[in-house]
């Protein structure tokens, strides 16, 4: 998947949070103060799944929960896999099994037909239906490029984010549309991600910020960093934190955006940027964003997961792996202060995280060294006051 761009380092001129000194990892909890808003749910029970368990490859690019089949689809560097949650068995397909291309970089499932759509990194687009693969590429379809990063299904349409623009395929009409700098507000045409919901399609574009397409009006909106600076964030919360966007997730009328130079949120009126130096996300190098609600988003970074779980109070849970012991670590942070650190037997298999997927109360995480399932027994959203929280495998800190 994408490698770090050879650009100047971030030299952000930011207004930092006023934060108390962080507690050391071994420090005991401090007593809650008056007005304490509560603490978030923390995932402490994890399962790791690798090639030893049947995955075709441990480099995980894409994950899609499929509640109709009670399974999870997994795109890897060398094949497609399906994890059956009832039997806990894995089925897999490689090129010898009919998969048109070995690298599966994006997955979506059509809720009406059950068809599984696959973005193929170098091989175009595939549809997996009734045990058969249909292959779409530049020579037999309206796909603008065969390097496809992401795919999203909305209504009768399939949208593809490629390195040379976006393609839109109406399955019922068998009609293709192509969007590049010629007919869309793309200053660059390298599309990294796509998210579709509520009649809107959002594209994250290298060098062009976020593009929004309204299906009803056929009109575009363009979200850029308005200060015009590539190397610094000159003005706080004025738009997308950087024009090199790598992921976009739209949920509850809220836009979550990942970039290689920070992350941000937009509620339709106000922007908010997130940076590692403020103590939330563990890194500014973000591979993807996965929103759960208007309050929660999991950012997949090169140094672990930064999950903002309550936007209003700036409360985060950062999940990493101890490289020496391979234990899982979860840090609860608020406004840059570490409130609590938990350690558990295992967590994410590797700190280079490429994707996250919500599956009911559980969360699936794809890394460069395997797949993980965070089990949400007793899960609750946002925060709970200390006196109402209950213990469990993944409860309050």
Image: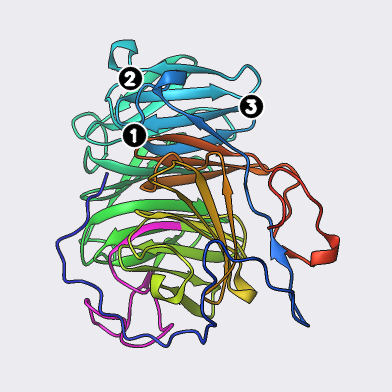
Task: From the top left corner, tell me how far across and down residue 50 is, in percent.
Answer: 43, 26
Disc with the residue nearer the chain's start (2 vs 3): 3
Of marks 3 and 1, the one in the foreground:
1
Outermost residue on the right side: it is: 388
Residue that appears at 78% across and 50% down: 391
Of marks 2 and 3, the one in the foreground:
3
On screen, residue 114 versus residue 122, left or right, reads right
Disc with the residue nearer the chain's start (2 vs 1): 1
Determine whether 135 is above or below 125 in the image.
Answer: above
Q: Nearer the viewer, residue 206 or 113?
A: 206
Disc with the residue nearer the chain's start (3 vs 1): 1
Residue that appears at 14% across and 61% down: 6
- Residue at numbered disc 2: 99
Label 2 and label 1: CA atoms lie apart by 17 Å
Q: Is residue 201 visible?
A: no
Task: From the top left corner, tell me how far across and down residue 397 is, in percent.
Answer: 68, 58
Label 2 and label 3: CA atoms lie apart by 22 Å
The answer to which quarter of the image holds residue 119 is top left
Assess whether residue 240 is covered by the magenta stretch. yes
What element does badge 3 sit on? loop
- At label 2, counting other C-alpha atoms closer than 10 Å, the crowd grade (few under 14, some 14-19, many 20 or more) is many
Q: Are marks 2 and 3 in contact (CB under 8 Å)?
A: no
- Residue at numbered disc 1: 59
- Assign the N terminus to one quadrant of the image: top left
Task: From the top left corner, tell me how far across and down residue 27 is, in percent.
Answer: 59, 66
- At label 1, counting other C-alpha atoms closer than 10 Å, the crowd grade (few under 14, some 14-19, many 20 or more) is many
Q: Which residues are magenta?
A: 222-248
Q: Are marks 2 and 1 in contact (CB under 8 Å)?
A: no
Q: Is residue 15 visible?
A: yes
């Amino acid at each position: 998947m994408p490698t770090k761009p050879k650009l100047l380092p971030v030299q952000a001129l930011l207004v930092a949070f006023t934060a108390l000194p962080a507690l050391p990892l071994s420090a005991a909890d401090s007593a809650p103060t008056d007005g304490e808003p509560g603490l978030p749910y923390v995932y402490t029970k994890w399962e790791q799944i690798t090639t030893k368990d049947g995955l075709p490859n441990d480099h995980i690019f894409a994950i899609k929960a499929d509640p109709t089949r009670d399974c999870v689809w997994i795109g890897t560097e060398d094949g497609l896999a399906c994890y059956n949650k009832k039997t806990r068995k894995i089925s897999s397909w490689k090129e010898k099994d009919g998969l048109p291309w070995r690298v599966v970089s994006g997955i979506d499932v059509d809720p009406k037909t059950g068809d599984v759509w696959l973005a193929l990194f170098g091989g175009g687009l595939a549809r997996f239906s009734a045990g058969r693969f249909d292959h779409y590429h530049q020579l037999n379809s309206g796909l603008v490029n065969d390097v496809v990063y992401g795919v999203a299904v909305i209504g009768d349409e399939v949208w593809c984010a490629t390195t040379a623009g976006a393609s839109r395929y109406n399955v019922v009409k068998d009609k293709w549309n192509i969007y590049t700098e010629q007919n869309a507000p793309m200053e660059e045409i390298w599309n990294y991600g796509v998210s579709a919901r509520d009649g809107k399609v959002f594209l994250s574009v290298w060098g062009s910020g976020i593009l929004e397409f309204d299906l009803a009006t056929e009109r575009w909106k363009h979200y850029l960093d308005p200060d015009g600076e590539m190397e610094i964030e000159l003005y706080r919360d004025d738009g997308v934190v950087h024009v090199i966007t790598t992921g976009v997730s739209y949920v509850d009328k809220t836009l979550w955006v990942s970039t290689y130079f920070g992350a941000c949120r937009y509620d339709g009126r106000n922007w908010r940027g997130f940076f590692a130096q403020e103590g939330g996300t563990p890194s500014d190098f973000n591979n993807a964003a996965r929103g759960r609600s208007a309050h929660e988003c999991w950012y997949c970074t090169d140094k672990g997961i930064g999950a903002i779980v309550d936007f209003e109070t700036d409360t985060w849970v950062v999940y990493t792996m101890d490289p020496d012991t391979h234990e899982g670590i979860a840090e609860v942070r608020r406004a840059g202060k570490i409130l609590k650190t938990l350690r558990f037997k295992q967590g994410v298999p590797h700190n280079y995280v490429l994707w996250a997927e919500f599956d009911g109360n559980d969360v699936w995480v794809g890394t460069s060294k395997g797949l993980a399932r965070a089990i949400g027994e007793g899960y609750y959203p946002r925060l709970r006051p200390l006196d109402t929280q209950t213990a469990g495998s993944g409860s309050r800190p």
